[in-house]
Image (tube, rainbow, N blue to C red):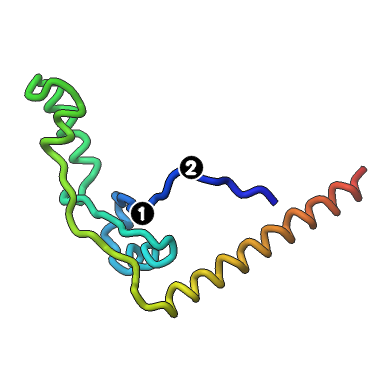
Amino acid sequence: MVYFLIPFQIDTLLACGGLAKNSLYIQEHADIVGCSIILPRENESVLLGAAILGSVATKKYSGLHDAMKALSAAGQVVHPSKDERVKKYHDAKYEIYKSLYEQQLSHRTIMQNALQ
């Protein structure tokens, strides 16, 4: 089995959109991936994006990067649980997922061979 290796360590994610408003969903994801999750200060990302584009269109800011720096900011940061049982639980679920994925690939090969 080939798993993709990322040449750098990811330790923080940014969440936006409707599900970012669900604190249980965000906490579970922080626990599952083992990363802190930053929520934007402005929770209406579509409106913020429109404001950023509008401010550039009206020449208030010279470009998107400047407008984004001026108008957006980090809000609450959600950290993964420090409870080792939570990490152990999610690690075990990931091992099961990998095993099921391996089985799926094996079953797919069996079925492809049967159709030849």
Q: Secondary structure at mark 2?
A: loop
**In the rendered image of this protein, does residue 95 appear above or below residue 89?**
above
Residue shown at 60% from the left, 67% from the top: 95
Residue on which the image places disc 2: 7
Q: Nearer the viewer, mark 2 or mark 1?
A: 2
Q: Is residue 65 left or right of residue 58?
A: right
The numbered disc on residue 11 is 1
Please state the horizontal and vertical placement of residue 98, each as a whole percent of the image.
63, 61
Q: Secondary structure at mark 1?
A: loop
Q: Quadrant of residue 110?
A: bottom right
Q: How many marks?
A: 2
Residue shown at 24% from the left, 41% from the top: 46
Q: Quadrant of residue 80?
A: bottom left
Q: Amino acid at mark 2?
A: Pro
Of residues 91 and 17, the one drawn nearer to the viewer in this rendering: 91
Please state the horizontal and vertical placement of residue 107, each as a whole percent of the image.
79, 57
Residue shown at 89% from the left, 48% from the top: 113
Q: Amino acid at mark 1?
A: Asp
Please state the horizontal and vertical placement of residue 92, each as a whole percent of the image.
56, 72
Residue shown at 17% from the left, 22% from the top: 63
The numbered disc on residue 95 is none
In the rendered structure, are the residues bearing label 2 and label 1 in contact, judged by CB atoms less than 8 Å apart? no
Q: Residues within 10 Å of mark 1 (few under 14, many from 20)?
A: few
Please state the horizontal and vertical placement of residue 79, each as a whole percent of the image.
29, 65
